[in-house]
Image (spheres, rainbow, N blue to C red):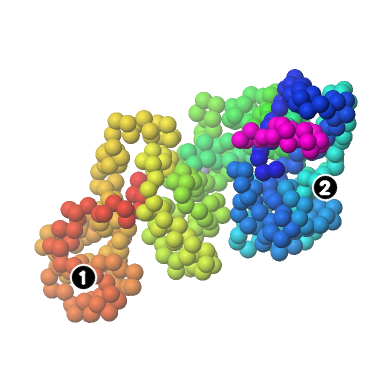
Amino acid sequence: TMLSTEKVYNHAELQRWIERVNKAAAQLGIPINSLIFRATPKLDGFAAYDDGEHLYTRGDGKRGTDITRVMERGLIVANNGKRGLGAGEIVVSASYFQQHLADKFENSRNFQASVVKEKELGSATAKAIEAKAVVFFPFSLLPSWQGSSVQLIEHLDEIITQQYNSVDYDVDGVVIEIINDELKTYMGATRHHHRWQVALKENLATAKVKVVQVHPQTSRSGRVNPVVEIEPVRLSGALIKRVTAHHYGMVKEKGIGPGAIIELTRSGEVIPKIIQVISAVDPELPPCCPSCGAKLIWDNDYLFCTNNTQCPAQISHTIEHFFRTLGNIDGFGPATIDKLYANEIRSIVKIYTMDSEDFEQVGFGPKQSLNLVNQLQRSRVEQIEDWRFLAAFGIFRMGGGNCENLLRHYPLDEITTRSDNPPSTTSSSPIAGKLLVFTGTMKRGKRSDMQAQAKKLGAKIGSTISAKTDYLITGENVGATKINAAQEKGVQIVSESEYLAMLTTPAPQPEQPPQPSLAF
Ligand SMILES: [Zn+2]
């Protein structure tokens, strides 16, 4: 029961499966006209297994992680069913989702994840559980159609429609199986799926829908993308509320705006596309950047916000892209980045200098703050592919593939130091990210020049000693107050010559933050 289900996409493929079943039945001497087929809706939920005492995740053909906590949080079995009914799905009522959750979760899958997660439940999720809008639905309790293979083929379209409409949950296919245990055992399974069961998926679905609004969204590159909000429609089992137009050139040319009628298609589990505009209206074009208010400019079919260094959307999406691309760091999703942004923490460099106190100061809880710091630390020491690291900076035209190509010709170290402005990128310096205080008269040059150089190497400059100071760099004629303060706070005191020697020593690589100053 923990294998995945083989998918078939049309009548011919289903027919071939039925022939295999019939052949196996004949080999066992079971009369074909006595075989019973069953059709049930294929729930698009979070797969789980209930052994009566514990609830487990499923996947990879094994019993997965214990998620009994979900039951302790008040999740019930569908149809007042009892515990211990084996395999099923955690699902949320589609109508409840649309009414209460659609503005909080991108899709029901994200919501399901919020039900299962280890962390404390959000209030919307807790409410949905309390309202019994989310349930564990054992497969054995699903409504079903039963009949012979002849009836199945003859009434296939009606049977499919009936199954899709039999539950108020997201359905992404119809499971068809035989119920004869002897035959099931005989047919057995491949490494991936049972041979006695298939899922019939609708390969292609189209719908004509009305446009509610066109929302501009500024990406990290400054390109403003049109997201077309539509009156919700079910396509291939999924509820669709938004669809992306290619660019504003298309919106303008085809006349997409409130009230327009468009035709959509969705193939399998792929994101929906606009096929054509059936009834055009005055296009809805944004006069300015939805994030920063800057005037937009056209570049061929695309609208751009050129306020690259100030636009909140561009900055926060760039930071999001960085952490998402690293791929080994949790907790730095849009909500975290937005919160940091609101508190004027707007660069990757700055984030990497934060300790848990800093996170708490901008409103994160103690536990989350500690977790964020641990995640940052993990990303400093955990090895990742060079291309991934390079792609994380989101440099124009430098996606994963181009990064791999470039790295075939130049090692990473060489790429990161190749620049028109070498000092700003040599953040492999041991003082990168460190807080320095200079004091006394320097021999090498003006103190302000040395401070400027240190900044270029990624250091922060302070004027007074605090517990956060990393180094006190001492020239000649230093007052005792500064030295005492440094000793008291455990700040390392280095002479000017020691400091200069330090600058020529590369930092040990594993402890190096991912050279964040490249990003901005
Ligand atoms: Zn902008």
State yes or no: residue 250 in magenta.
Answer: no
Q: Where is residue 335 in the image (x, y as percent from the top left)?
A: 56, 54
Residue at 77% x, 61% y: name it.
130
The amino acid at mark 2 is Leu
Residue at 77% x, 33% y: name it.
183
Q: Where is residue 463 in the image (x, y as percent from the top left)?
A: 28, 68
Q: Is residue 249 visible to us here?
A: yes
For residue 493, the mark is 1
- 469 w.r.t. 167: above or below: below
Q: Is residue 419 visible to us here?
A: no
- Quick check: 303 left or right of 50? left
- 485 w.r.t. 285: above or below: below
Q: Position of residue 155 (x, y in %)?
A: 88, 25
State yes or no: residue 176 in magenta.
Answer: yes
Badge 1 density bin: few <14, some 14–19, many ≥20, Cα 10 Å = some
- Quick check: 289 left or right of 273? left
Q: Mark 2 points at which residue?
A: 141
Disc 2 + disc 1, Cβ < 8 Å: no
The amino acid at mark 1 is Ile
The CA span between labels 2 and 1 is 71 Å
Q: Nearer the viewer, mark 2 or mark 1?
A: 2
Q: Check disc 1 and report its element: helix, strand or loop.
A: strand
For residue 367, the mark is none
